Amino acid sequence: MNILAITLLQAQSGAAPAPAGGGGMFWIMMILLFVIMWAFMIRPQRKQQKELEKFRNELQRGSKVVTAGGIYGTVDEIKDKTVLIKVDGDVKLRVDKNSIVRDFTEDAPKA
């Protein structure tokens, strides 16, 4: 017999259909899935964003930085939203503060 035939027989006999089961279990699983996603994906990303924002706010003249485009340079001047980076010799670039992604002072070769 198929499900349609069973449902029709139950409707004719007046018996209440059996619950599909797991209605409450579905919501528990959905909540559990959201908590796991938050713990392993959203929370670490927020922490990383806060650390990057703190790094950008604490920039100082002379810091060696890398931009999102892969340009290495030394901070020469800092304004509200922009940073002037000395790249090589007399070459200076003005970049958005949000494009600075990391400090490479520890990675810089000792001269």
Image (cartoon, helix red, strand yellow):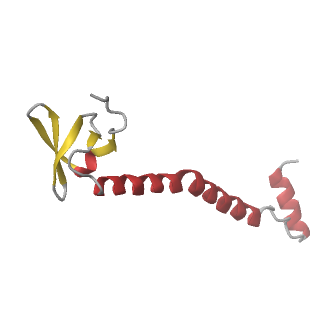
Of residues 78 and 19, which is closer to you in this image?
A: 78
Left or right: residue 45 versus residue 53 is right
Residue 104 position, x and y percent, is: 33, 38
Query: In percent of the image, x 34 and y 43: which residue is there?
Result: 102
Residue with the most extreme front position: 111
Residue 80 position, x and y percent, is: 18, 59
Query: In percent of the image, x 32 and y 39: which residue is there?
Result: 105
The C terminus lies in which quarter of the figure?
Answer: top left
Left or right: residue 74 versus residue 48 is left
Residue 2 position, x and y percent, is: 84, 48
Query: In percent of the image, x 89 and y 71: which residue is there?
Result: 14
Of residues 82 and 36, which is closer to you in this image?
A: 82
User: How many badges with numbers are in the image?
Assistant: 0
Query: In percent of the image, x 37 and y 38: which residue is there?
Result: 106
Residue with the most extreme left position: 90
Residue 11 position, x and y percent, is: 84, 66
Of residues 68 and 21, which is closer to you in this image?
A: 68
Query: In which quarter of the view is residue 69 placed?
Result: top left
